[in-house]
Amino acid sequence: MILVSGATGTIGRPLVRLLSAAGVPFTALVRRAEQGRELGCPHVIGDFDRPASLPAAFAGADRLFLTGAGAVPADGEQPMVRQQLAAITAARDAGVEAVVKVSVWRAREGARLAEGAHATIERALDKSGLAWACLQPSGFMQNFRTGAGSFTEEGDLIGAYGTGRVSYVDTRDIAACAAALLTAPEPPAGKHVVTGPEALDHAEIAAKLTAWSGKPVRYVDLPPDAFAAKLAGQGLPAAFATDVAALYAEVAAGALEETTDTVERLTGRRPRTFDEFLSDERVRS
């Protein structure tokens, strides 16, 4: 049985739909009963912030989908690290055989923010004795719908990417890769960088958003320091804003422009393009 954490998130929801459609036994791990009822699938209550709630939630699971939302560090602490280490301990104690974790592209020890936090969790997985695999996605196309992609009050796209290109990936394709690994006959293994089929700069994305919405959308580019100051002005800790700006500078230099064949290799079909993502969003709306 597969235990799906993050089942109400942008990757967890399509994963739940895929497993349901395939008739694969799974249970969604949710923090509140109403979340499970809204998903309409088997569910258990558990919270990574309450480790005592996890043994009962993990009972009977043999594979775990491990993900969780990031958070602004408080006093240097990365909440995600604490939460996912508790989940790994619970999985090992419950006899889970294998874990498929959503990490981040370019996760590495000593790196800033999520890249360093995910590397710490990956190292803990490697030492846990569990079989494991990591999906390391590029940026999410869905960020341009959920608001995680930054927009001005006028509706223009804003960032500090320069002309850097990003191989954004649809979270439904990440979910399909997770489903393939979780249901494989052999325990999953390896690190898999997951991208879309093309790398776009943000001026090109703004043009696509314009064509999709029928409203003019520009890309407004700021120097990294100016973008950090803007984030700090919105109430984010200054050190956090500075680290975010440094990551933007890396993207501007091409850190996320590569494309990979991971989606096709794991699922047997090509990843969705940004135009296909927007077309599906038009149907949803």
Image (cartoon, rainbow, N blue to C red):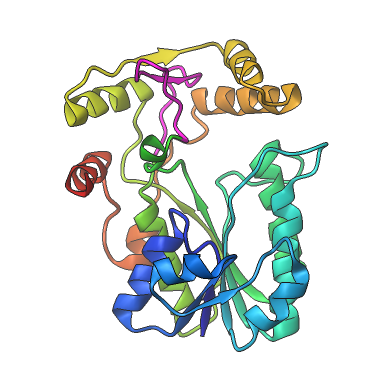
Report the residue at 73% width, 49% height from top: 79
The answer to whether any part of residue 126 appears in the image is no
Residue 142 left/right relative to 189: left
Residue 209 left/right relative to 226: left
Residue 271: x, y in percent? 30, 53
Report the residue at 52% width, 33% height from top: 255
Looking at the rendering, which quadrant does residue 212 occupy? top left
Report the residue that reaches farthest toward the right.
Answer: 75
Looking at the rendering, which quadrant does residue 132 occupy? bottom right
Decide which of 30, 118 is in the foreground and name it: 30
Looking at the rendering, which quadrant does residue 22 occupy? bottom left
Report the residue that reaches farthest toward the bottom.
Answer: 60
> In the image, is residue 268 above or below residue 221?
below
Decide which of 98, 238 is in the foreground and name it: 238
Report the residue that reaches farthest toward the front.
Answer: 34
Report the residue at 41% width, 57% height from top: 174
For the image shown, how many numbered marks are present on the structure? 0
Residue 159: x, y in percent? 48, 20
- Residue 74 shown in magenta: no
**What segment is highlighted magenta in the picture?**
148-167
Decide which of 271, 261 is in the foreground and name it: 271
Report the residue at 23% width, 28% height from top: 208
For the C terminus, the image quarter is top left
Residue 3: x, y in percent? 54, 76
Residue 131: x, y in percent? 63, 76
Residue 250 left/right relative to 87: left
> In the image, is residue 98 above or below residue 221?
below
> In the image, is residue 201 above or below residue 147?
above
The answer to whether any part of residue 79 appears in the image is yes
The majority secondary structure of the magenta stretch comes to loop
